[in-house]
Amino acid sequence: MGTQLTKDYAELINSRYVLEEVIQLLSLDMDYRDMLEMVSVDTPADTRIVSITVEDTDPAQAMHIANSIREAASNHIQNVMDIEAVNVVESANMPTEKASPNVMLWTFAGGLIGVLALCAATLIQYLLDDTVKSSEDVEKYLGLSTLALIPVVTEENNRKIENEGFNRQKNWQGDIAHACSWDARAMKNHYLMAQISDMVKQLYEWFFLKAGGIKKKQKNISSELLESFAQQITEREDIFGDDMPCISTT
């Protein structure tokens, strides 16, 4: 019986009579349909309590509308249902937080919808793409063997290739110069060692084969021979400078 009464009360609260009376009382710029969308009436199970909720962008106006509906509906219910009084449990209070929208919920939902839409668009684009992208596609769809591939060279790729070629040429020239310098030093040292070996051999032949019986002139001959040996080494050393000429082709 009590549950049926609360359902009757909910219908009377949402009636045109009550809502239009509230509109006139508060001088609101709206009609019955607009007011009906703002008001929701709940009847908790197994109780005789009716809860009135009003949603509005202005929290103060929402509170005034809810209290006005409570008063107008209380009088209307007493007249229609022929009861003595409708007790008020609690009046509407000023809301301190927004009831909607839930920013976190809508942000998460929007991100999820965006990801799903992106995946769907990518899948559709892949399924509808019938262009040939590789030599395997040519052999698969046309039954032809690929003899050669010609890459597409853009301006950016062309600059990259030129820079890489310049760097390789620069490194190659540096390696050649280093190799030539090293070869020059090695050839110079090898030549000097050969000349020194030749001079030592000449000294040996002179002292033991040619100058064995000449005691008087041995000292002078040895001095002259050493001076000649030093002069020959100096002359041969001047043949090569610090740098060895190197011929290379680019």
Image (cartoon, grey):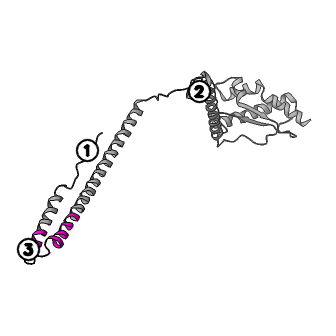
Q: Position of residue 230 (x, y in %)?
A: 14, 66
Of residues 128 and 146, the one nearer the viewer is: 146
- Residue position for label 3: 220
Amino acid on which the number 1 mark rests in the picture:
Ile
84 sits left or right of 63 in the view: right
Q: Upstream in the sequence, badge 1 or badge 3?
A: 3
- Residue position for label 1: 247
Which mark is in front, 2 or 1?
1
Q: Upstream in the sequence, badge 2 or badge 3?
A: 2
User: Residue 34: in sight, yes or no?
Assistant: yes
Amino acid on which the number 2 mark rests in the picture:
Asp
Magenta part of the chain: 197-225
Q: Residues within 10 Å of mark 1 (few under 14, many from 20)?
A: few
Q: Upstream in the sequence, badge 2 or badge 1?
A: 2
Q: Residue furthest bottom?
A: 215
Mark 2 near mark 1, Cβ–Cβ under 8 Å?
A: no
Q: Quadrant of the N terminus?
A: top right
Q: CA distance from mark 1 to mark 3?
A: 47 Å
Q: Residues within 10 Å of mark 3 (few under 14, many from 20)?
A: few
Q: Quadrant of residue 163?
A: top left
Give residue 104's mark.
none
Give residue 137's mark.
2
User: Residue 134: in sight, yes or no?
Assistant: no
Residue at (21%, 64%) from the top-left corner? 196
Q: Position of residue 46 (x, y in %)?
A: 88, 40
